[in-house]
Image: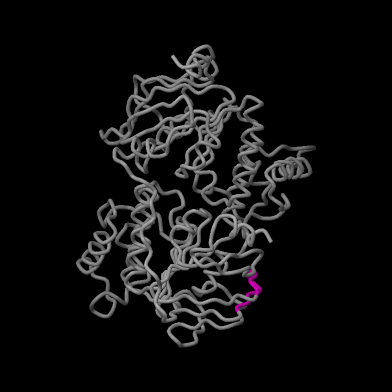
Amino acid sequence: MSVIAASLAERVPQLSLRNIGKKYAGIEVLADVDVDIYAGEVLALLGENGAGKSTLSSIIAGLVQPEPGGSMTWQGQTYCPASPGAALESGIGLIHQEIRLLPDLSIAENMFVGRLPTKFGKVDRAYIESEAQKQLDRLGLKVSSTRKVAGLSVAAQQLVEIAKALTLKANLLILDEPTAALGGDETEKLFLQVERLKAEGVSFIYISHRMEEIAKVADRILVLRDGRQVAVHDTAQVAVRQLVSEMVGRSVDRIFPEMAPSQERVVLRVKDLHCREMPLFDIDFCVHAGEVFGIAGVVGAGRTELVRAIAGAAEQITGTVVLDDLAQQFSSPNDAIHAGIVLVPEDRKQQGVVVEHAIEENLIYGNTDLLPNKGWVSPAGLRSFALKAVSRMGVKGSPNQLISSLSGGNQQKVIIAKWLARNPKVFILDEPTRGIDVGARAAIYELVAELASKGMAVIVVSSDLDEVLGLSNRVMVMSRGRQMGILNRGDATPVSVMELATA
C-alpha cells in the first residue's frame, strides 16, 4: 500500500458512496460507483460527455434519486437527500456549468434568493449586500453586489455562482466546469480560494475537461467511462495521456492539426471600428482566405463584444466592415448571415440553441431560405436537410430528438452544422470547446483546419490560450476593448500574448 493510500485508510471520509447507480427507462446510465471523499480534499471527476458525471453529481446533490441497492453516508450518517434543498441543509452544494442566475435581480439578491434574511419584517438588504460583497471581493470580481446580473459577462456570472455557494457555508461543493468561461487570472483566483477553503476542511468534487487544471487543483481523481468507474487515482499527478486513455478507452493526444499557410486574398477587413455599446476602440485588422485568426485576452478584454459587433449583434458602431472588397452595414445578425458571416456564440444555451425544440428545428432556424419551395417548411424537406447536417458533423442523435437531451459537445456540433449548411465566407467561433470533452474537441479542431483548407476565413475566440495558439495562423491580443497587437504564429507564445493582454 502506498503512503497516500495508507494515510487515506486511516482517515474517516466525509462522504462515502457504495454501489451507486441509475437507470432511465430501463437503460443503465450509471453503475457500481464506489468512492470516498475526505475533508479538505479535491476529488477530480473526469470522463467524456455522457460518461455519467452529471448523473453522479445530481445524485449527490439531491436532484436525482439513485437505484435501490446503493447507499451513501455523509459525516457518518445515512445520506439520501430528497431534494437539492435537503442536500444544502446537510452541507452539500452543486454549482452547475449552465448559469442559473435571475437576470433582473441584483447580484446580492441572487446570492440569497430563497433564503432572504429579514429585519423588522423586511428584507435585510444591508446584510445581504454586505455579505455578498465580501464573497465577490474574495474572488476578485470588481463589481457592486447591488447591480443587476443582466449585462454581466458569462465569466462574471460564473464567479457570482461560485460566490453564491460560498455564502452557503457548505462542507462539500460540487463544481461543474467552474473555469469554462474564466481566463487565466480568474482561474488562478478561484484555485487560491479553493486552497483556502480546503484548509478549513471544505471538500470539493471538481468536474473539468481542462486536463491541465487537474494536476494543479486536485488531490485525487475518479474516472468514469460509459457510466462505469474505471479508475480511482490516489494522486492527481497522473500523465494526461493515461487519463485520456481511461476516459475514452483509446489513446487521444491533444495534438492540434497541421495548419496550412493562409492565402493572400483578404476576405474580411475591419477598419477603425468603435462601439459605444460594448465598448470597443480603434479595432483594425484583416483576415485572409484560408486563415485561422485567433483573438486572445483576459476576461473583459472585449473579445466576445468584438465578434458580436462584426456579426451584426451590436448598435452604435462606427468604422467599416469590408467583406470581399464590399463595405457592409449590418443592422442585425440576419444581415451578416446573409452576407456570409456566421457566429457560433459563447453562450450555447442562451444564444445558440432553443433547448425546448428538436435538433431539426434548431438546424433550420436562420436557414429557411436554403429549403426548396421558396422556404416553405415541409416535414420531408426539414428531415432531409437535418439528416445531411447531422451526418456532416457526426451529431449523436436523431433529427426529431430534443436538443436538451444532447451533451454539450453534441449541442455545439448542431450549432456548427447549422451554419456550415450556409457555406459562409467568415466562420466565427466564440469559445468553441467550452465544456466539451477531449474527443469532441479533437473533432472541432479538425473541422477548423478543414474549413481553413477550403479557403474560408475562420475567427476563433477562446479563453484557453493553448487552443488559440494551437489553431491560429495569427493571434490578435485585446485588453479593455482595445487591440494591443497582432502576433504571427511563430511569435505567439503564452508569454508574448500575456504581456500584451496585461499591458
**Is residue 279 within the magenta segment?**
yes
Q: Quadrant of residue 54?
A: top left
Q: Position of residue 358 (x, y in %)?
A: 32, 57
Q: How is the image coloured?
A: one colour
- The outermost residue toward the top is 10
In the image shown, does 179 or 156 lie closer to the viewer? 179
Q: Which quadrant holds the C terminus?
A: bottom right
- Residue 387 lies, with reference to residue 106, above or below; the image says below
In the image shown, does 449 or 361 lie closer to the viewer? 449
- The outermost residue toward the front is 490
**Is residue 363 within the magenta segment?**
no
Q: Residue at x 43, y 80 (%)?
A: 267
- Residue 9 lies, with reference to residue 401, above or below; the image says above
In the image shown, does 113 or 196 lie closer to the viewer? 196
- Residue 349 lies, with reference to residue 318, above or below; the image says above
Q: Is residue 459 left or right of residue 202?
A: left
Q: Is residue 244 left or right of residue 478?
A: left
Q: Which quadrant holds the N terminus?
A: top left
Q: Position of residue 265 (x, y in %)?
A: 41, 81
What span is in magenta? Answer: 273-281
Number of residue marks: 0
Q: Position of residue 160 (x, y in %)?
A: 63, 47
Q: Position of residue 28 (x, y in %)?
A: 28, 32
In the image shown, does 184 or 145 lie closer to the viewer? 184
Q: Quadrant of residue 289?
A: bottom left
Q: Residue at x 54, y 44 (%)?
A: 178
